[in-house]
Amino acid sequence: MLDRSQYSVPLRQATVGNEVQALRTTSRDVTRRWFLRQAILTALATPAIAVAQSRALPRVGFLFYGAPGASPEVAAFRRGLNELGYIEGQNVIVEYRYAGGRPERLPAVAAELVRLKPVVIVTPGTPGSVAAKAATDTIPLVFAGVADAVGAGLIANLARPTTNVTGLTSISSQLGGKRLELLKAVVPKASRVAVLYNPSDPSNALAVKALQESATNLGLSLQRVEVQKPRDFEPAFAMMKEGRAHGLFGAAGLLTTGHRKTIVDLAARARIPAIWGERQFVEVGGLMSYAADFYDQIRRSAGYVDKILKGAKPSDLPVEQPTKYELVINMETAKFLGLTIAPALLLQASEVIGG
């Protein structure tokens, strides 16, 4: 007869082994389900975390008169931020708004930017700064490259702005006399100088207003030539030729700077020596310019942003004035016009193009 007792231990061991294996399988299933659940929860939570983090980052506005895309102005501002340790999307958000080169759109674009309630708004140039100031008297504004911040009504005092506005002024409107002096040095026999400007541009109007006394002291008479649209350029140069202008004073602004290549080519065709209020004109073939470095001022506006983000008030931040100016001369254009640039003047130049 078969003794079943000899099988009792193996049978029990088999039963226990099955139970252990079942427990292991169950444990793996539970672990797998737990990790799957955590992965799902993490995936669902990540967008919420990202949104929360983006909302926590300080928001800076940048009101630009140009069009979207690569521009030296935007690049200069980003460089200034990076130098101070700010990286967009990581520790700061910059809201860019563009007027597309149309000054009449600046008030609406400024109002749109104000509605986003940034901590501070940066505004290169006079027209954009004036539009931003009209849009808000509470959000801090930092301007850059403004020709005459007091004359434009942005501030009352350079040392203590006392409002929500501060920044960097190019004091370009005060450089008219020096520019005429430089033009006279290149064209000694000049007695009549045309002034190309846009009367609707506040920076242009201020520059021309301050020009007459300097012209009188240099024995120059001024021929004011207004342009308000690109189609005005060719008739303007026809007027200069008719008025027998010996030289040209070109006021920099949204209209003229935005169409600088066209204007410089017209000046060359009319064979009129010109001095400009921004180096960009010389880079595309203009004769010479004398001005503060506009892009450098935009870069340094990031320093004001940094201070405001750290709690400073615009009213306590003095407006910065340029400490140096650039004289840029294009020797290829001088040769084309048959002009001889004195060695002493070349020594004063910050940069000489061509030669």
Image: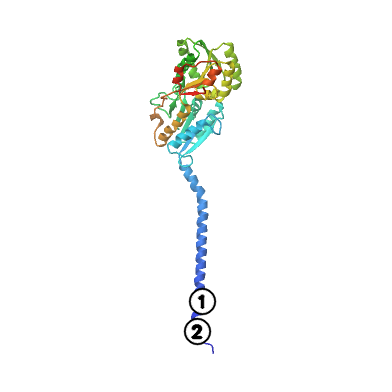
Q: Residue at x 50, y 58 (%)?
A: 35
User: Residue 6: which numbered mark, if any?
Assistant: 2
At label 1, which amino acid type do we have?
Answer: Ala
Crowd tier of the residue under label 2, counting other residues whose Cα lies within 10 Å: few below 14, some 14–19, many 20 or above: few
Q: Position of residue 143 (x, y in %)?
A: 46, 28
User: Residue 14: which numbered mark, if any?
Assistant: 1
At label 2, which amino acid type do we have?
Answer: Gln
Crowd tier of the residue under label 1, counting other residues whose Cα lies within 10 Å: few below 14, some 14–19, many 20 or above: few
Q: Residue furthest bottom?
A: 1
Is residue 14 visible in the rendered structure shown here?
Answer: yes
Q: Position of residue 30 (x, y in %)?
A: 51, 63
Q: What separation in Å lies between label 1 and label 2 (alpha carbons)? A: 14 Å
Q: How many marks?
A: 2
Disc 2 on helix, strand or loop? helix
Q: Position of residue 185 (x, y in %)?
A: 47, 14
Q: Residue at x 41, y 30 (%)?
A: 314
Q: Residue at x 59, y 18 (%)?
A: 269
